[in-house]
Amino acid sequence: MNICVFLSAAELDERYTRPAREFAELIGCGGHTLVWGGSDVGLMKVVADGVAETGGRLVGVSVDFLSAVARAEAHEMVVASDLAERKALLLAKSDAVVVMVGGTGTLDEATEILELKKHGKHAKPVVLLNTAGFYDGLKQQFLRMEEEGFLPVPLTDLVFFAEDGVAALAFLEESMGVR
């Protein structure tokens, strides 16, 4: 399975890097492919290292203005001209999406994928990996949107909130019929 992971390229605390590495190792040990933003810095590097060291494939999609920090040893690396093309390529190359901790770029990617899913433009499973309760506030906001009629489909049809990498991968494998 090709798993797109949206996440930060920032250098982060152990409370985020350790669970990210554990999830990455699950991806690699499961024989899956990581599809990610291609950067070889910060949390993106942690995840790419974990997947690579456990035998998984790396498919990166960088963008022109970040190509200087793209990972040289990826199995495949595409450089998009802008962020919109990057997001489209990441989605096209993946079977499923996991949103890990991140900033505004990650949030932009997450909301775009959920909007596409809401409108039936893709049916790929989406997981928000809620490491250390990072997405508790967003989950509450989504629940409020659902309760107040802003979501035309049930939240559970759009996204699965996982508290750890084991639950995230189990959901994806079940959704995709992988064992």
Image (spheres, helix red, strand yellow):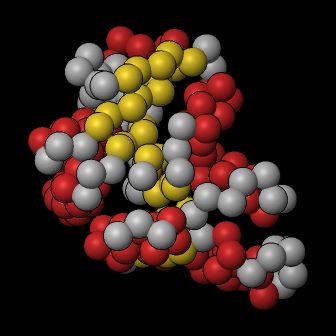
Left or right: 81, with 177 as reference point: right
Asked if 57 appears above or below 121 in the picture, the reply is above
Q: Position of residue 105 (x, y in %)?
A: 54, 41
Q: Residue at x 80, y 76 (%)?
A: 153
Left or right: 59, with 156 as reference point: left
Q: Position of residue 138 (x, y in %)?
A: 58, 70
Quadrant in which residue 67 is drawn: top left
Quadrant in which residue 66 is drawn: top left
* Residue nearest the viewer, comparing 164 with 60: 60
Q: Quadrant of the C terminus?
A: bottom left
Q: Residue at x 35, y 12 (%)?
A: 68
Q: Residue at x 44, y 47 (%)?
A: 2
Count of residue discs: 0
Asked if 13 appears above or below 139 in the picture, the reply is above
Left or right: 40, with 52 as reference point: right
Name the residue at the left extreme: 53
Name the residue at the bottom extreme: 147
Q: Position of residue 169 (x, y in %)?
A: 36, 67
In this rendering, does residue 112 appear at all?
Answer: yes
Q: Position of residue 152 (x, y in %)?
A: 86, 74
In this rendering, does residue 16 appear at all?
Answer: no
Asked if 83 appears above or below 135 in the picture, the reply is above
Asked if 165 appears above or below 146 in the picture, the reply is above
Q: Residue at x 87, y 81 (%)?
A: 149
